[in-house]
Image (cartoon, rainbow, N blue to C red):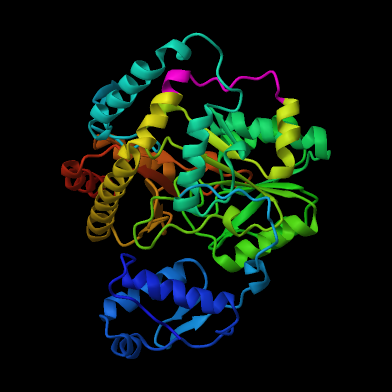
Amino acid sequence: MISINKKSPTPVYEQIYESIKNEIANNQRKANEKLPPIRLLAADLMVSNNTIKQAYSQLVAEGYVNNIPGSGYYVEKIDTSFFKKKNNSDTITPLQTNNYEKNNIQIKYNLEYGTINPLEFPVKNWKKAIDLALNYEAATLFSKYGDRDGYDCLRQDIAEHLFVARGVKCSSDQIVIGPSTYVLITQVLILLKKYKSINTYAIENPGYDTIRETMSLLSNKVYDIPVTNTGISIRALSKTDAKVTYVTPSHQFPLGVVMPIGKRQKLLQWAIDNNGYIIEDDYDSELRYNSQPIPSLQSIDQNERVIYLGTLSKAISPALRIGYLVLPKHLCNEFNELFNTFNTNIPELEQHALHYFFESGDLEKHLRKTGKLYKQKHDSLIKELKELLPKDFEIIGTGGGTHFILKNLSGRLTEENMTMLALKQGVKVYPTSRYYFGTQPNNKVMVGFASLSTEDISDVCQRLAVAYK
């Protein structure tokens, strides 16, 4: 039975979503069972239709429910045993545009993935955080090497943030702070090779090319697993002897698909059955525009099979180069032993400043502001491009993150054509073929929008429409 409290600070749609999700997890709603029609449930709970739609949309986004047009919403078949809590008494729960000339073509809009608009960086608050670090801790900041795993207070900040924002369950001792995802992944793969004799890897195809190269340096057995419309193919993965797989389940890079709960459970089961590990890269998962952020894979892992990776590059700035790793508990001692003489390679001043940025609440404010701003850019771009682009174009990977893909369905244009035609209109978009291993589709380009100002969006869309007419 769904119950709501309209006086609660929790939004009503979220209460309804949580109630139905818990009923599914507890087997109170069975697979293929039809949910009440939106209008009937809205009338029963005395809320608006939109409130019910919002709750149902979140359930669909996470894979608990399937929407069959013209029929209704039905409970998906999932393995509810994953929701049963393990007796882990020792688990510690944390507290809560630039212009430049190239080949005589002036580029007015550089839509590169991963860059931000410099005017949107919180300069004033970041300066305040640096001043606090210097005022209170200058004596220790410049007198010694920092903690190998990163500043302990910052690791606690990250643990608390991850628990609230992503459902990640960990203590600060499980967190390692590093300068980049690539450095951290290299350390993880070396760790697993030394202590677990694991040197067979799998990666999404398409996927991060740099991660693929990193894996190839450490092993000659790297499997490229195709990505379906629900994420990495478990069937294809199961046909390999890989023991580690790298995935981006909450917003697959670069295609943007979301892995539903049912497939997440199957992936976890793959790791259990093969005594393997999943490296979950949660690179921009907080940026969801049509639903709440999808809970992390680590948050439903009961068997310590997920190694979680995150970054603050998307939240604040790529220039900070601060990433972090959440290790399963049973790997922490081995990691500490193996990398005992290593340092984090991130300046102490930046780490301490980031701690104050967390502590003051400025980071949370910035995340909320950035999320609203990126949603506005995302929605405006998608709306205008759908109206202006020719009918043989499809926009894929929408709904989250800071990029999407433009795909030419007819084959009229290749990625080289699309890149050059946009360039002639002063807009730089990026090929996607570099992210495919093996056969490479030649009809997609990537559009990053974080660096745009909202005032520039209409001009960008007009220029792309002229380029691809």
Point 73% across, 55% down: residue: 271
Picture mark count: 0
Residue 144, located in which quarter of the rendered image?
top right
Q: Where does residue 112 sit, x and y in percent of width and height?
A: 37, 36
* Left or right position of 241 against 347: right
* Left or right position of 463 against 279: left
Let me know if residue 251 is in the magenta part.
no
Residue positioned most to the top: 143
Say if residue 138 shows up in the picture.
yes
* Left or right position of 449 against 349: left
Q: Where does residue 276 sit, x and y in percent of width and height?
A: 76, 50
Say if residue 469 shows up in the picture.
no
Residue 173, located in which quarter of the rendered image?
top right
User: What type of secondary structure mainly makes up the magenta span?
Assistant: loop
* Left or right position of 457 against 182: left
Residue positioned most to the right: 197
Point 41% across, 45% down: residue: 445
Residue 423, located in which quarter of the rendered image?
top left
Residue 317 vs residue 392, the one in the foreground? 317
Residue 341 vs residue 374, the one in the foreground? 341
Q: Is residue 437 above or below residue 109?
A: below
Point 32% across, 72% down: residue: 12
Residue 134 vs residue 436, the one in the foreground? 134
Q: Is residue 354 above or below residue 260?
A: above
Q: Where does residue 267 sit, x and y in percent of width and height?
A: 67, 59
Q: What are the residue bounds of the magenta stretch?
A: 339-350
Q: Where does residue 443 sit, x and y in percent of width and height?
A: 45, 50
